[in-house]
Image (cartoon, rainbow, N blue to C red):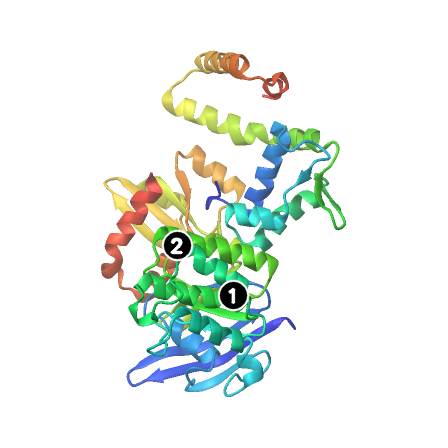
Amino acid sequence: MNDTIVEARNLFKHYKDLNALDNVNLNLSTNRIYGLLGRNGAGKTTLMSILTAQAFASSGEALVFGASAYENDSVLSRICFIRESQKYPDDFQPQHAFRSAALFYKDWDQQFADRLAEDFQLPLKRRIKKLSRGQLSAVGVIIGLASRAELTFFDEPYLGLDAVARQLFYDRLVEDYADHPRTIILSSHLIDEVANLLEHVVVIDRGRIIMDADAEDIRGSAVTVSGSADTVDAFLMGRKVLHRETLGSLASVTVDEALNSRERAEALELGLELSPVSLQQLVVRKTMAGAGTAASGAENFTDDVMEARR
Amino acid sequence: MIDDSKPIFMQIAELIENGIVDGTMPEESQVPSTNEFAAFHRINPATAAKGVNVLVDSGILYKRRGIGMFVATGARAQVIARRTEEFFEQYVKPLTLEARKLGISAEQLNTMIERSSGLAQETGTDKERSAAL
């Protein structure tokens, strides 16, 4: 495809005793909103750092706009990377950070930045060191949106932002993206909050990409079937089970397959209940299924299942 | 309003159809732009566009170049015809299944349906709507 703007080929990143990236292959296309999802330490930030030339891969190739980004101004000026913990010079105020961004990004929209600063109630003339965690995140969010860079990475941009401010971020993102399409990569743990904004989802788990699909294809690609354990198990015989939970003689089983309308009707006739699996549940299940560390997330599982039953 | 049960573009198409059926989006009126749908439902604009295009493909909406998207003449009848066909599978079947589970007889069920239609007629202002039900 010729609308590819990011191409990663066989990327590896080794630390002393850890493979942070383990043979990553990835294509990102123009004018899409991507979700880069995965657990802490899965390799999200490492991948974004390599793509934006802020870290070196141990081996493999990363092309952005068809070239390597390292020391390449013509590529770097089209990329904006909002890090979770961006450092600014000690005496910087938000207005200085915005002025620097304006010099760097040719499509910088100062009016938009001013409006966002007002929306987020960001004090422009306070030293950044003195800002709260949420205000610091707002500085990053504003730079990421107002730069209108062709390729924008947001690495968990919401730390310290309350629910209202996060909603504001999502709203402004959708509005501005509609008027100014570009490629946005949103790395997030709050999957339920961003799920509907995403056009494509990439899930990374222990350095490997385990899911790379359109969000609409994922929706409905898994289903949870609940009812009496015998009936559920008989009905789901031979299917790929992602998760199984029992309560007395009841079972609630999530399978990594969609049911067609005939199968759905059959399930209902058997008295089984079908419930959709949200993107967040699916990512949790898939990353757990691979890790085999069921114990650490057992509580979340139970919560999810209880929620699914309601 | 948007949930995980099926693809979002299908839900958007259904929401527009709902508007056409209940008269909030009359025939030959302009429907919101895909960007407006995206902002309102907080969804990806490409997804909203896909939902609108489903309805364009089936002739329920049509494009006027440079102006926007409009509800086609005859769209309401078309949507109602299709939904009437689906009504048995989507509503009647699950209803009778649940009734059987609870041991509700066909006679009891009929009485309930009659009572419910009576209520709908009393409260409904749109006669046509009750007729469609």
Is the residue marked by circle 2 packed among few (<14), some (14-19), or many (20+) residues within 10 Å?
Answer: some
Q: Which residue is drawn at 25% across and 42% down?
A: A247
Position of residue A231 measured from the top left corner of the image (x, y, whole percent): 36, 40
Closer to the N terminus: mark 2 or mark 1? 1
Q: Which residue is drawn at 59% across and 78% down?
A: A65
Q: If the image is split into quadrants, where does the C terminus of chain A sit?
A: top left
Whether marks 2 and 1 lie on the same chain: yes
Q: If the image is split into quadrants, where does the N terminus of chain A sit?
A: bottom right
Count the marks: how many?
2
Callout 2, which amino acid? Ala
The one of B26 and A233 positioned closer to us in this rendering: B26
Q: In which quarter of the image is residue B88?
A: top right
Is the residue marked by circle 1 packed among few (<14), some (14-19), or many (20+) residues within 10 Å?
Answer: many
In the shown orientation, is residue B33 left or right of residue B98?
Answer: right
Q: Image height check: is A251 above or below A109? A: above
* Residue beneath disc 2: A165
Q: Image height check: is A237 above or below A90? A: above
Disc number placed over residue A13 in the picture, else none? none
Residue A279, visible in the rendered structure:
no
User: Which subunit holds the residue at mark 1?
Assistant: A
Disc number placed over residue A146 in the picture, else none? 1
User: Which subunit holds the residue at mark 2?
Assistant: A
CA distance for labels 2 and 1: 16 Å
Callout 1, which amino acid? Ala
The one of A103 and A253 positioned closer to us in this rendering: A103
Q: Which residue is drawn at 48% across and 78% down?
A: A51
Helix, strand or loop for disc 2: helix
Residue A247, visible in the rendered structure:
yes
Position of residue B26 measured from the top left corner of the image (x, y, whole percent): 68, 31
Position of residue A15 measured from the top left corner of the image (x, y, whole percent): 32, 84
Helix, strand or loop for disc 1: helix
